[in-house]
Image (cartoon, rainbow, N blue to C red):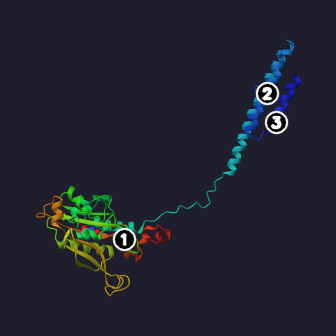
Amino acid sequence: MKQQLEEIRARASAALSKAKAQQDIESLRVQFLGKKGELTAILKQMGKLSPEERPVIGQLANKVRAVIEQDIESRAAELKQEELARRLKEETLDVTLPGSRHTLGRKHPLSIVLEEIEEIFVGMGFDIVDGPEVETDYYNFEALNTPKNHPARDTQDTFYINENILLRTQTSSVQVRVMEKQKPPIRIISPGRVYRSDAVDATHSPSFHQIEGLVVAKAITFGVLKGTLQTFVKRLYGEDSVVRFRPHHFPFTEPSAEVDVQCFSCHGEGCRLCKGEGWIEILGCGMVHPKVLSNCGIDPEIYSGFALGMGLERVVMRRYNIDDLRLFYENDVRFLNQF
Ligand code: DAH
């Protein structure tokens, strides 16, 4: 039995030194020290020994167990060390390698120019306000002096959600919301998305952007409107740009005008960019109609104001000489990376 124990110790130690992984060590532990293991099998036969032999063999068996346990511990530690060394070697970080570059996106051309426009107006003391894109008929048309059956509604093919709710066709709706809440003096612009049931082509999209402007205070005249817009256009297109006001009609302003900028390509001669006109239209404007003021609880006998509405896409197309509006919405990086 003594021999058997010695032999088990020797075999265990040999097997352990060959163990390559933690699992190998675990199965060796089961094989030698487990409940059904080799050492236990020997101990079960202790009953057959004489009383003198029993403590001697018992002591030896305990020693063999301790030795095997010790071997297991040290082999496990060795393996751990080897694994660590291997990983340190494999996972070395070469800090001199060039890093992987993260490609940063760019600002969309619409955002670039919108921010410029906002900056110009903020510089003149305007606040920037936001309004809902889902609007009621009242704010989009009715309060803006455009009752049902008004012919001006025909020019704005509208996405109706039901009879009273629609996707706003113009940012002018924000004028009403601001005047209802805020007493004059008012000086705001409101950029945002608007919707019209138009078929897509190079100059039309069912969704586009406008920038609304509104000034209401005492003694606001058409002269203030002209001065403000001339200043705006010179800041946006350069000091030498020329502006002209052309009479027009909008239901919510009286008098109304459209503003053209002299074509910067041909200086009024007429060319491809301005379609031979010499002038490029950039916005609509006018003195806020007294009915609109009183609809919003502002006394037109005391206060007056002007308003303007600008199509952002048009301004950006002219700025960068872009001839197809669809490019703005296609998210093609080959286009977007040019700005
Ligand atoms: N809302 C008009 C449009 O979509 C643009 C406009 C014209 C807005 C004159 C105004 C304005 O505030 O005074 O065609």
Q: Which mark is residue 37?
A: 2
Q: Does the residue labelled 1 lie within 8 Å of ligand 1?
A: no
For the C terminus, the quadrant is bottom left
Kindly identify the residue that appears in the image at 71 percent across and 40 percent down.
80
The label nearer to you, 1 versus 2, is: 1
- Residue holding disc 3: 15
Tell me the amino acid under the disc marked 3: Ala
Tell me the amino acid under the disc marked 2: Gly
For the N terminus, the quadrant is top right
Residue 41, image quadrant: top right
- Residue holding disc 1: 313
Please indicate, yes or no, whether residue 74 appears anywhere in the rendered image: no
Is 167 above or below relative to 34?
below
Q: In which quarter of the image is ligand 1?
A: bottom left
The label nearer to you, 3 versus 1, is: 1
Tell me the amino acid under the disc marked 1: Glu
Is 102 above or below relative to 68?
below
Q: Work out whether residue 247 or residue 317 is closer to the camera in this orientation and state it.
A: 247
